[in-house]
Image: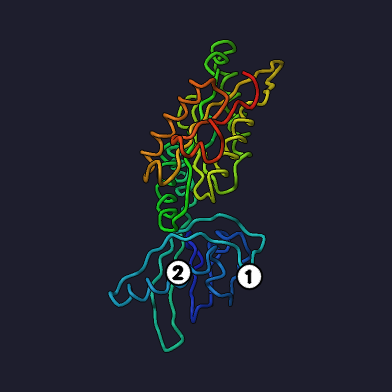
Amino acid sequence: MIFDAAGEGIAFVQSGRIEKANGALAQLLGVQQPWLSGRPAADILADAEDWQRILGLTRAAARRGESANHEVMLRAPEGGAGRRGVWSQLTARMVGADGEAEAMILVLTDITPLKQREEMAWHQANHDELTGLPNRRLLGENARRLLSVAMRRDRLAALMVLDLDGFKEVNDTFGHDYGDAMLRRVAMRMSMALREYDLIARTGGDEFVILLPEIDDLEVARRVAEKLVAAASEDIEIGDRLSHMSASVGIAVFPTDGQDFDSLLRRADAAMYASKQAGKNRCSFASPRHAEAVMPAALPALRPH
């Protein structure tokens, strides 16, 4: 039969349950063919709610005399030992409906390689190749969304620009490979110093941008800045060399220093340069009144430079 010989996964579904499935579908899921018989069709979907969407699309398409198409991620039924992360182009067509006995044919084509290429392309376009951190593009997209949420909730947020002090000298002295290794190490340390929901991106060279999407007060921003400066200032041993850097940080507070990502970034960048001019290895708030609220002056150096 064509049904059994087809290279694409095919299932006959009635009243939401798989009445019959071919070997190609079992192979696609990585399970034995008898395992599929009688199971709810929703069980083969990674997101069970997809089934209701498929039903809605298929019913609407049937009224037009057409089939419905949907991209779905599959899973082995009941979390069995089948394949994981399988993407499929699912084509569904109604073949009869008699009250509750709604029947349809599902045809599933493996598009996992295509989705993997798409995901890889998206990752490369939105992440820094060296550190794996988000790049400015992805940070900007996420920051605009999170700042909008903070505005609706009437919450404070903080944007920081951090620049490594003395990185150029290290890079020039020991070479780019050594400098790259240092950047990866510092990026990892700073990521670990942040809260789970904070964002960090490498925006170029030795500069990083950090977003604290919701903070209770300015003291939270100060404490996080201290942790970042401390993380960047720890000695780093790569090979047989022990190196030390420090960091200068500028902090802009939402919404008083700016109500959008770009204006906050400009204010934080200017504050970062103020930290460098004040002696490096420290942080500065963009607004003097914010600095006065949490400290008598800019955050003092955490260790001599």
Residue at the extreme bottom: 99
Q: Is residue 226 visible?
A: yes
Three-letter code, disc 1: Trp
The residue depicted at 45 percent of the width and 38 percent of the height is 252
Residue 106: which disc?
A: 2
Depth check: 103 or 283 in front? 283
The residue depicted at 49 percent of the width and 46 percent of the height is 116
In-image side of 134 versus 225 (left or right) = left
Residue 267: which disc?
A: none
Q: Earlier in the sequence, mark 1 or mark 2?
A: 1
Three-letter code, disc 2: Leu
* Residue topped by disc 1: 35
Q: Total label count?
A: 2
Q: Secondary structure at mark 2?
A: strand
Q: Secondary structure at mark 1?
A: helix
Compared to residue 279, the image places residue 231 above or below, namely below
Depth check: 130 or 49 in front? 130
